[in-house]
Image (spheres, coloured by chain):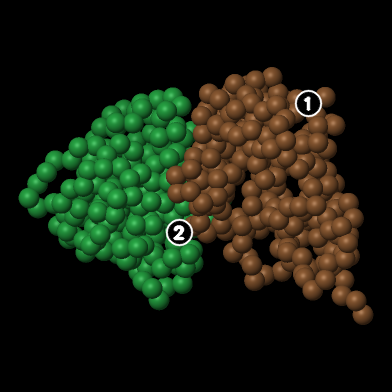
């Protein structure tokens, strides 16, 4: 099994996909705080390079789910400098695969457009989106320079698929189910190479609105939502 | 105008101050000590300290953000990389946030032409080419600072001009060194900041024009880095390393 360091393993996302990913990878969990269900977790502060380096020794891939959204200092330290630490550690240890994550907010300036595919990032000046975009640019520079195959996912809402019909609600664009995120992580961790050593992808599960397309993820990774979850949002007629 | 110059203790900062002194009232800022004079206001402190930065930007009309790091940060290694990264990203964000809050209308940022150095030498590089920053933090951090400026301009009523400077040297000091396509004389770099301060970035200008990038180099024969766009600002380099470059027919910059 491929050994994968999962940074941010106790956050809002990773605990929901660790059980499924753990069937395919030897996961090394790392976070500042304990795992919510008590899984063994290495205490790692991504703002400390030495801690990142030590945590990454012996793995074949790093998946970075860390984020600090609102803080004027920590957002830069975690989302920008943290990305630098991950890529620098990958270089130092010869790790050739990185999965990076960022918010849909990175392209939120296109909020009034439709059929948005691969577009230049326009995060604006907010701490969350800007610092994540800067981190992605660091990943891109390192990936190109050292041939580190780096996949970056842009997503937003995450959660389980609905358990039954949803009434009087639309689904937010860019929402992805846990099942589909697991699929996407596997594709990213298993793919041998991506064009230019770095690619960012729109990622979501809910089709139908014609707002953000996932064509690139389909074409380059073979990603496909596992079921048409938009079918849960049907108005009775 | 009253102009704040950051990184003012650096060699570039001092050259910019000398260039602007006859036309503008100056306020100088740096983490490193600055000489106190009666004519020029001085703020010593870090771009990472919002209170200090607020004092520095209050009451000025424009900011020249040279991007020059203080001499006091680590000279090499990881600590230097981290210091450069933090100042170029968070430091620039702190500075621009304060400038916007203070109603400053225009900013000129010192970036680097090295973001385009990865391209082969047999192409002409204008501002239309996608930057390919290396991982060297001296260059990568400048590029990230540039992106921070761009995004601040997108969302706020401020005009920012990014100057991608060549490798700043002094013509009389290069001696018999191998000529470098990136060479830019320190005095011409300072001239470019002066020219950029005159660019119209007022509130009536749409954001796509309030944010602009210019390549700043010497006028050498058969130049790789084209400076025609900057000439539109009135920039005309005067120190062009003539003794280092053979004339090429039809190959002016």
Q: Residue at x 68, y 55 (%)?
A: A156
Residue at image mark 2: B152
- Circle 1 sits on which residue? A26
**Residue A107 visible somewhere in the drawing:** yes
Quarter of the rendering occupied by the C terminus of chain A? bottom right
Residue extending farthest right:
A237
The answer to whether A60 appears left or right of B146 in the picture is right
Q: Position of residue B225 (x, y in %)?
A: 45, 47
Q: Colour of chain A?
A: brown
Location of residue A164 in the rendering, given as x and y in whole percent from the top left corner: 88, 61
> In which chain is the residue bearing label 1?
A
Q: Residues within 10 Å of mark 1 (few under 14, many from 20)?
A: some
Q: Residue at x 55, y 25 (%)?
A: A51
- Image marks 1 and 2: residues in contact by CB distance under 8 Å: no
Question: Mark 2 Cα within 10 Å, few/some/many (few <14, many 20+)?
Answer: many
Residue A13 is left or right of residue A135, and the answer is right
Q: Which chain is green?
A: B
Q: Which sits in the foreground, B191 or A187? A: A187
Front of the two marks 1 and 2: 1
Image point 82% across, 24% down: which residue?
A1
Picture quadrant where residue B3 is located: bottom left
Q: CA distance from mark 1 to mark 2?
A: 42 Å
Q: Residue at x 46, y 72 (%)?
A: B206
- Residue farthest along the bottom direction in this orientation: A237
Q: Which mark is residue B153?
A: none
Q: Secondary structure at mark 2?
A: helix
């Amino acid at each position: 099994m491929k050994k994968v360091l999962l940074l941010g393993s106790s956050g809002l996302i990773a605990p929901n996909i660790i059980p499924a990913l753990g069937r395919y990878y030897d996961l090394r969990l790392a976070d500042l705080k304990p795992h919510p269900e008590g899984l063994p977790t290495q205490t790692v502060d991504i703002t400390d390079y030495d801690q990142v380096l030590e945590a990454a020794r012996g793995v074949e891939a790093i998946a970075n789910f860390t984020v600090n959204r609102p803080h004027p200092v920590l957002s830069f330290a975690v989302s920008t400098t943290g990305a630098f630490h991950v890529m620098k550690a990958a270089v130092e240890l010869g790790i050739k695969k990185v999965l990076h994550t960022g918010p849909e907010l990175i392209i939120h300036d296109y909020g009034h457009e439709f059929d948005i595919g691969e577009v230049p990032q326009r995060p604006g000046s907010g701490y969350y989106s800007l610092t994540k975009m800067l981190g992605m640019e660091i990943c891109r520079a390192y990936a190109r320079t050292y041939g580190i195959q780096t996949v970056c996912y842009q997503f937003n809402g995450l959660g389980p698929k609905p358990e039954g019909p949803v009434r009087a609600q639309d689904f937010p664009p860019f929402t992805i189910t846990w099942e589909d995120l697991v699929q996407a992580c596997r594709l990213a961790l298993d793919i041998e190479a991506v064009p230019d050593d770095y690619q960012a992808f729109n990622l979501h599960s809910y089709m139908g609105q014609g707002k953000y397309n996932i064509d690139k993820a389909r074409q380059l990774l073979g990603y496909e939502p596992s079921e048409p979850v938009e079918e849960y949002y049907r108005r009775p007629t | 105008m009253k102009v704040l110059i950051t990184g003012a203790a650096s060699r570039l900062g001092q050259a910019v101050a000398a260039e602007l002194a006859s036309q503008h009232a100056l306020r100088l800022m740096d983490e490193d000590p600055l000489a106190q004079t009666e004519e020029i206001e001085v703020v010593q402190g870090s771009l990472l300290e919002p209170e200090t930065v607020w004092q520095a930007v209050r009451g000025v009309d424009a900011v020249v953000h040279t991007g020059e790091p203080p001499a006091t940060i680590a000279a090499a290694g990881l600590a230097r990389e981290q210091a450069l990264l933090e100042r170029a990203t968070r430091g620039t964000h702190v500075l621009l946030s304060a400038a916007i809050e203070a109603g400053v209308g225009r900013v000129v940022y010192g970036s680097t032409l090295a973001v385009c150095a990865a391209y082969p030498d047999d192409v002409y590089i204008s501002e239309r080419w996608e930057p390919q920053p290396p991982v060297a933090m001296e260059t990568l951090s400048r590029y990230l600072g540039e992106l921070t400026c761009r995004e601040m301009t997108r969302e706020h009523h401020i005009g920012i001009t990014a100057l991608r400077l060549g490798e700043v040297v002094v013509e009389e000091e290069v001696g018999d060194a191998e000529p470098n396509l990136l060479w830019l004389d320190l005095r011409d770099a300072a001239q470019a900041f002066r020219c950029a301060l005159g660019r119209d970035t007022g509130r009536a200008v749409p954001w796509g024009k309030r944010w602009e990038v210019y390549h700043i180099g010497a006028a050498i024969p058969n130049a790789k880095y084209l400076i025609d766009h900057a000439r539109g600002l009135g920039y005309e380099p005067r120190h062009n390393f003539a003794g280092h470059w053979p004339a090429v027919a039809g190959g002016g910059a």
